[in-house]
């Protein structure tokens, strides 16, 4: 694989990862807004349907982010190794792997926001039921 192919693949992975994160956040906020306005109006069967759909979509996006993070880590390590050995033909390009802390933080934030969304949904449902 040429240097250009490595760099192009790495940047494509970064772009897809960023888009996947934005999709995750969009679905999360749609769920929060729906929870705020209609959670107390839904019947239990509809609540289960909404939560199952939310879980499937968010779970798929989390899995995509996980695999993309692994791909970027592998590509970054390969580019860093080539740069160390002097085989990387792009002078001045500093490649390093983001490290495990980045991926662990991303996992904690996405899983935490998913759980927080569920808590918010049921809190709004309980608050809405007590008002009416």
Image (cartoon, helix red, strand yellow):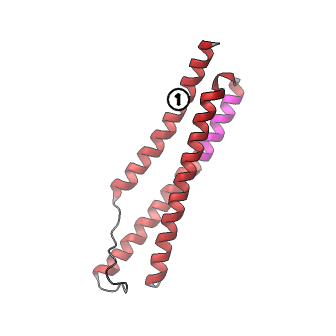
Q: Which residue is mark 1?
A: 120
In the image, residue 5 lies at what x, y percent? Answer: 49, 80
Q: Is residue 43 above or below residue 61?
A: above
User: Which residue occupies the foreground of this view, 30 or 46?
Assistant: 30
Q: Is residue 103 above or below residue 46?
A: below
In the image, residue 49 lies at what x, y percent? Answer: 69, 34
Residue 85 left/right relative to 130:
left
In the image, residue 105 lies at what x, y percent? Answer: 38, 49
Residue 81 left/right relative to 40:
left
Magenta-drawn segment:
46-57
Q: Residues within 10 Å of mark 1 (few under 14, many from 20)?
A: some
The C terminus, quarter of image: top right
Q: Main secondary structure of the magenta part?
A: helix
Query: Number of marks in the image?
Result: 1
Query: Residue 96 falls in which quadrant of the image?
Result: bottom left
> What residue appears at the point 66 percent right and 35 percent down from the top-left corner?
50
> What residue appears at the point 62 percent right and 44 percent down from the top-left corner?
56
């Amino acid at each position: 694989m040429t240097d250009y192919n490595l760099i192009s693949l790495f940047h494509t992975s970064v772009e897809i990862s960023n888009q996947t994160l934005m999709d995750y956040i969009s679905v999360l906020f749609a769920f929060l807004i729906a929870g705020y306005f209609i959670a107390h109006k839904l019947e239990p069967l509809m609540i289960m349907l909404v939560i199952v759909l939310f879980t499937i979509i968010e779970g798929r996006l989390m899995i995509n982010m996980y695999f993309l993070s692994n791909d970027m880590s592998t590509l970054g390590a390969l580019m860093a190794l080539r740069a160390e050995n002097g085989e990387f033909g792009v002078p001045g390009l500093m490649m390093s792997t983001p490290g495990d802390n980045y991926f662990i933080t991303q996992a904690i934030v996405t899983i935490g926001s998913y759980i927080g969304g569920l808590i918010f949904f049921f809190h709004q449902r309980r608050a809405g039921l007590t008002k009416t």
